[in-house]
Amino acid sequence: MSQKAVTNSKTNLLAMAQIAVCAALLCVSAFITIPIPFLPVPFTMQVLAVLLVALILKPTHSLAAALIYILLGIVGLPVFSGGKGGFGVILSPTGGFIIGFLFAAFFVSLAKGKTGSLPRYILSAVLVGIPCIYIPGIAMYMLYANADLWTAVTTLTSVFILVDLAKCVIASLLAIMIRKALLRAGLLAA
């Protein structure tokens, strides 16, 4: 076996391990929930986890991690918020947010660039990640609750936006530290 084949094999194995660990992180993040009595959508750590994954991995790898997470839930594993699973969850009020995770994972990772700059990470998470998650989430909520756009936006953003903006900053800070550690250990391509 040539040296290039061995290097490619190690790189592929490392990428698969990173994707698997990040998919597992997304699964675990759904179990950290704070129910809100007047809304069918709870606070979870999923937004933070999706943004963290996107800020650490390459776009295709973060998309793969989010897709694996969603597919695990669709086939019935209890990986969605509140320990739910099954295709019905995608058709519920929270389903749009789950779909938005796919978009956020890919587009935040794309927008972050390769520099590892904290301001760029925060801007990518806020200006790309939040809309990618919120737009499908609001659309699904409108369908589920038979709400108009204004009602859906005010209902969902008034409660969640400040917490999700804080999650953007936290995810960005964590991503900088984790990326530096992974680069030092040779576990992440520069």
Image (cartoon, rainbow, N blue to C red):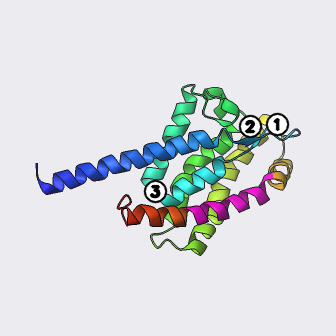
Callout 3: SS: helix
Image point (26%, 51%), residue name: 10
Image point (37%, 58%), residue name: 187
Q: Which mark is residue 93?
A: 2
Q: Dot 1: few (<14), some (14–19), or many (≥20) neighbours within 10 Å? A: few
Q: Is residue 167 magenta?
A: yes
List the single residue furthest toward the left: 1
Looking at the rendered structure, the kind of residue marked 1 is Ala
Front residue (pair 108, 168): 168
Distance of mark 2 from mark 3, alpha carbons?
Answer: 27 Å
Q: Which residue is mark 1?
A: 145
Q: Position of residue 177 (x, y in %)?
A: 53, 65
Q: Dot 3: few (<14), some (14–19), or many (≥20) neighbours within 10 Å? A: many
The part of the image, by quadrant, that contains residue 175 is bottom right
Looking at the rendered structure, the kind of residue marked 3 is Pro
The residue mark sitting in front, 3 or 1, is: 3
Looking at the rendered structure, the kind of residue marked 2 is Pro
Q: Which residue is mark 3?
A: 59
Q: Earlier in the sequence, mark 2 or mark 3?
A: 3
Labels 2 & 1 near each other (Cβ < 8 A): yes
The part of the image, by quadrant, that contains residue 97 is top right
Callout 2: SS: loop
Image point (14%, 56%), residue name: 3
Give the tally of numbered discs: 3
Q: Is residue 138 visible?
A: yes
The residue mark sitting in front, 2 or 1, is: 2
Q: Which residues are magenta?
A: 160-174
Q: Quadrant of the C terminus?
A: bottom left
Distance of mark 2 from mark 1, alpha carbons?
Answer: 8 Å
Image point (66%, 27%), residue name: 88
